[in-house]
Image (cartoon, rainbow, N blue to C red):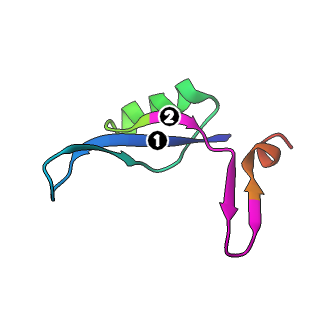
Amino acid sequence: MKLWTTEFKAICALTGELKTYIGPNVSGINKEDAQQWCYENEGHLVVVGEFIAEVSFDDEVTIDYEIIQNN
């Protein structure tokens, strides 16, 4: 399954402003499937895109999730 990035909006406790925060990555066959999971389990999350790679600049390591998922 693919991984999908999420976000949510909430009031900042410090400033009182409405802000957008990054949410957890969720699994799903496609974006709609991942959003359906969010509706059923974490109703405040919105799927914003596919998580395709993770880069660590300290170790210069790249994990390409798109290649892993297509194998």
In the image, what residue occupies the spot 68% across and 60% down? 55
- Rendering coords of residue 48 (x, y %): 50, 34
- Estimate how packed mark 2 is, as few (under 14), some (14 to 19) or many (20 or more) residues with alpha carbons within 10 Å: some
**Residue at point 47%, 30% (across, down):** 35
Mark 2–mark 1 Cα distance, whole angstroms, equals 5 Å
Label 2 is placed on what type of residue? Val
Nearest the eye: 48 or 30: 48
Region of the chain picked out in magenta, as a range: 47-62
Find numbered disc 2 in the image and state the secondary structure of the residue it sits on.
strand
- For marks 2 and 1, the one nearer the N-term is 1
Query: Where does residue 17 sit, x and y in percent of width and height?
Result: 18, 45
Residue that sits furthest to the top in the current view? 32
Residue 2 in the figure: left or right of residue 49: right
Disc 2 target residue: 48
Q: Judge the density around disc 1: few (<14), some (14-19), many (≥20) Cα neighbours within 10 Å.
A: many
Local SS, label 1: strand
Residue 4 pos. (x, y %): 57, 40
- Residue 34 percent location from the top left of the image: 53, 33
Q: Indicate the quadrant containing the N terminus: top left, top right, bottom left or bottom right.
A: top right
Residue shown at the point (62%, 28%) measured from the top left: 30
Residue of label 1: 6
- The image shows residue 34, relative to residue 67, as above or below, that is above
Pointers 2 and 1 in contact (C-beta within 8 Å) = yes
Left or right position of 43 against 67: left
- Kind of residue sitting beneath label 1: Thr
- 48 falls in the magenta region: yes
Q: Number of marks in the image? A: 2
Horizontal side of 43 relative to 48 (left or right) equals left
Point out the residue furthest to the left here.
Answer: 16
Left/right placement of residue 7 relative to residue 19 reads right
The residue furthest right is 71
